[in-house]
Image (cartoon, rainbow, N blue to C red):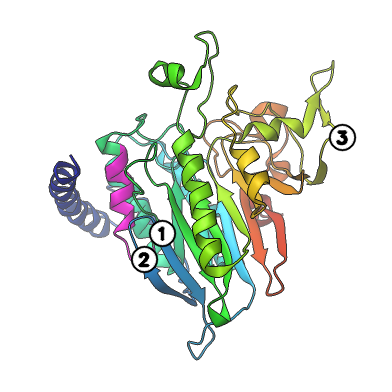
């Protein structure tokens, strides 16, 4: 099956690249009056560059390190810019606005790594536009990766989802992997960040959180037929997480880690509660560090136990999710940061449509995480509204 995927993907990518050559030429010849959907041509991101060196790479993981001007591995602050939910569709004006703010965030923050947590490219020509997006990222010169959301290709584990992961993974600055074959979905992978002395500074776990609860695995998990809703991390993904923690600990000793996915874990719903007026208030069960809640947490109604696994091992200090476009908070719950990556979406809904707020108060943007040389983690929002003309 994998061989058939590889053959099909090779020929499909070859056709796409040929088509892109003609479309890009048409864009250049007409000065952008034709082929307006070529957002990788319309947007000209600043080249930020990178001080990251790839140390090792295999089928599901990449080891990286930050270097100084002389190329030596350093323990300097490591900055991660993460965002979610571009929802790139066929409104190219909105696409350019969404991605325009995104590349301004990159130019402003100059991150070491960029992470997109799902629901990114949903256009009619998705397999083509995911390559356009990868080309756009290559122009920044920054290393990046991506996980899938509930809207990508609307597959659980099919060839088109695999091809999206495969296509982006072939770009030099993309650290995404198609992932272990025995795991649910695709693009389950890890990034290990090393410092001087071969010290493991941080491991980043990335998981495909699926779409909706499917009848095909109700019996396996004992989920009743009337329990409907968003999907959850599967037992093999949790087992992979725990095995990888133990494997790395046996080699490098105790180390910190963070986790990224699209659909939030059930524990996100513990941070706020809804009052009789329909407004969200802090529940008192967590320490809110910043942000607000404007919509219900779109987690699965079934808790598969990933957060319990996190508590058992004590390695993971922060979990990042997307999915809920107008929730922009970060909270400390049972010693773990639960974080909403700021949404980048200007297409589906935002605080203008939800609460009637002006764009100067909207919460689209990116989340900045700084890993300090002393092992500290600093998490803060960076809103697109700071780029609006006053």
Say whether residue 99 is left or right of residue 29.
right
Q: Secondary structure at mark 2?
A: strand
Q: Nearer the viewer, mark 1 or mark 3?
A: 1
Q: Could you give the CA–CA distance between mark 2 and mark 1, rounded to whole angstroms?
A: 6 Å
Are there few (<14), some (14-19), or many (20+) residues within 10 Å of tag 1?
many
Does 39 appear above or below 234?
Answer: below
Range of magenta residues? 161-173
Question: Which residue is denoted by mark 2 in the rendering?
Answer: 57
> Dividing the picture into quarters, in which one does residue 255 lie?
bottom right
> Residue at 50% of width from left, 64% of height from top?
192
In contact (CB < 8 Å): disc 2 and disc 3: no
Q: Residue furthest top?
A: 226
In depth, the one of 184 and 156 nearer the eye is 184
**CB-based contact (under 8 Å), mark 2 and mark 1:** yes
Point out which mark residue 186 bears. none
Q: Is residue 340 visible?
A: no
Is 172 magenta? The answer is yes
CB atoms of marks 1 and 3 within 8 Å: no
Task: Name the residue at 25% across, 37% down.
Answer: 159
Q: CA distance from mark 1 to mark 3?
A: 38 Å
Q: Quadrant of the N terminus?
A: top left
Q: How far across and how far down the image is residue 56, in percent?
A: 38, 70
**Upstream in sequence: badge 1 or badge 3:** 1
Q: What predominant SS class does the magenta segment belong to?
A: helix
Residue sitting nearer the eye, 203 or 210 = 203
Q: Quadrant of residue 299?
A: top right
Disc number placed over residue 61 in the picture, else none = 1
Q: Report helix, strand or loop for mark 1.
A: strand
């Amino acid at each position: 099956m994998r061989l058939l995927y590889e053959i099909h993907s090779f020929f499909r990518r070859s056709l796409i690249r040929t088509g892109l050559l003609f479309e890009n030429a048409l864009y250049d010849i007409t000065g952008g009056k034709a082929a307006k959907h070529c957002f990788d041509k319309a947007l000209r991101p600043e080249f930020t560059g990178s001080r990251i060196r790839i140390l090792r790479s295999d089928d599901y993981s990449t080891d990286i390190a930050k270097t100084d001007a002389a190329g030596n591995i350093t323990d300097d602050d490591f900055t991660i810019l993460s965002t979610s939910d571009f929802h790139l569709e066929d409104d190219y004006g909105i696409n350019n606005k969404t991605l325009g703010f995104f590349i301004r965030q990159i130019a402003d923050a100059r991150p070491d790594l960029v992470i997109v947590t799902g629901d990114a490219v949903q256009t009619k020509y998705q397999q083509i536009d995911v390559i356009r997006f990868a080309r756009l990222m290559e122009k920044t010169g920054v290393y990046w990766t991506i996980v899938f959301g509930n809207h990508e290709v609307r597959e659980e584990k099919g060839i088109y989802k695999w091809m999206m992961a495969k296509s982006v993974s072939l770009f030099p600055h993309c650290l995404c992997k198609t992932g272990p074959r025995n795991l649910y979905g695709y693009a389950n992978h890890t990034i290990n960040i090393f410092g001087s002395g071969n010290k493991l500074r941080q491991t980043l776990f990335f998981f495909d959180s699926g779409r909706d609860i499917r009848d095909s695995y109700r019996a396996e998990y004992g989920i009743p037929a009337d329990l409907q809703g968003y999907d959850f991390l599967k037992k093999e993904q949790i087992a992979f997480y725990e095995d990888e923690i133990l494997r790395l600990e046996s080699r490098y000793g105790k180390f910190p880690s963070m986790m990224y996915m699209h659909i939030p874990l059930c524990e996100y719903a513990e941070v706020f509660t809804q009052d009789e007026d329909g407004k969200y208030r802090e529940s008192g069960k967590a320490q809110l560090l910043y942000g607000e809640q404007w919509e219900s947490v779109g987690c699965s109604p079934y808790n598969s136990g990933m957060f319990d696994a996190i508590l058992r091992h004590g390695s993971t200090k922060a979990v990042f999710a997307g999915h809920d476009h107008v929730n922009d908070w970060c909270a400390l719950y049972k010693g773990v940061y639960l974080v909403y990556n700021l949404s980048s979406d200007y297409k589906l809904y935002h605080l203008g449509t939800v609460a009637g707020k002006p764009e100067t108060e909207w919460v689209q943007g990116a989340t900045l995480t700084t890993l300090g040389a002393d092992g500290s983690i600093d998490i803060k929002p960076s809103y697109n509204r700071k780029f609006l003309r006053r």
